Image (tube, grey):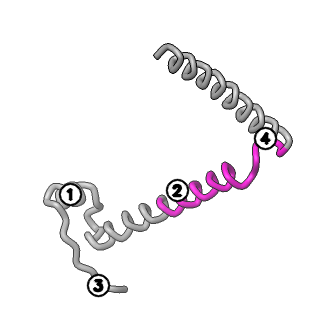
Amino acid sequence: MLRTQIYLPEELRKDIDKHRASNESLSEYIRKATEEKLVKDKKQGVNLKKLANELFSKPTISKQRATKWIKELRDERKREDRVLMKRLDRAWEKR
């Protein structure tokens, strides 16, 4: 084991003293709490990796469907651009 010195806020120390068993040392209590937190954080890290893999490694739509969707978006943008250009031309004519 490695010796480590830490500073605890007074309220935290009082809460720890209230909740730890009378036969349990402060060091034991802090080690257990730290291990529990570490296990939880590792699980959360694994869950985040799993979620990222699910979201980004597997396409949810087929390549053909995605290509069609992109084409539709581009066509829509071109139509919108043509409408805007017509409005701009009319505005310039009125000047």
The spot of residue 66 in percent (x, y) is: 78, 41
The spot of residue 35 in percent (x, y) is: 43, 67
The quarter of the rendered structure image containing the N terminus is bottom left
Q: Which residue does the numbered mark 1 point to in the structure image? A: 12
Secondary structure found at label 4: helix
- In the image, residue 55 sits, relative to residue 9, either above or below, namely above
Q: Answer with mark 3 or mark 2, whichever residue precedes in sequence.
A: 3
- In the image, residue 16 sits, relative to residue 88, either above or below, namely below
Q: Which residue does the numbered mark 4 point to in the structure image? A: 66
Q: Which residues, given as a range, are shown in magenta?
A: 41-63
**Label 4, residues with CA under 10 Å away: few <14, some 14-19, many ≥20:** few
The spot of residue 56 in percent (x, y) is: 67, 52
Which of 51/2 is in front? 51
CA–CA distance between discs 3 and 4? 58 Å
Which of 71/32 is in front? 71
CA–CA distance between discs 3 and 2? 28 Å
CA–CA distance between discs 3 and 1? 21 Å
**Label 1, residues with CA under 10 Å away: few <14, some 14-19, many ≥20:** few
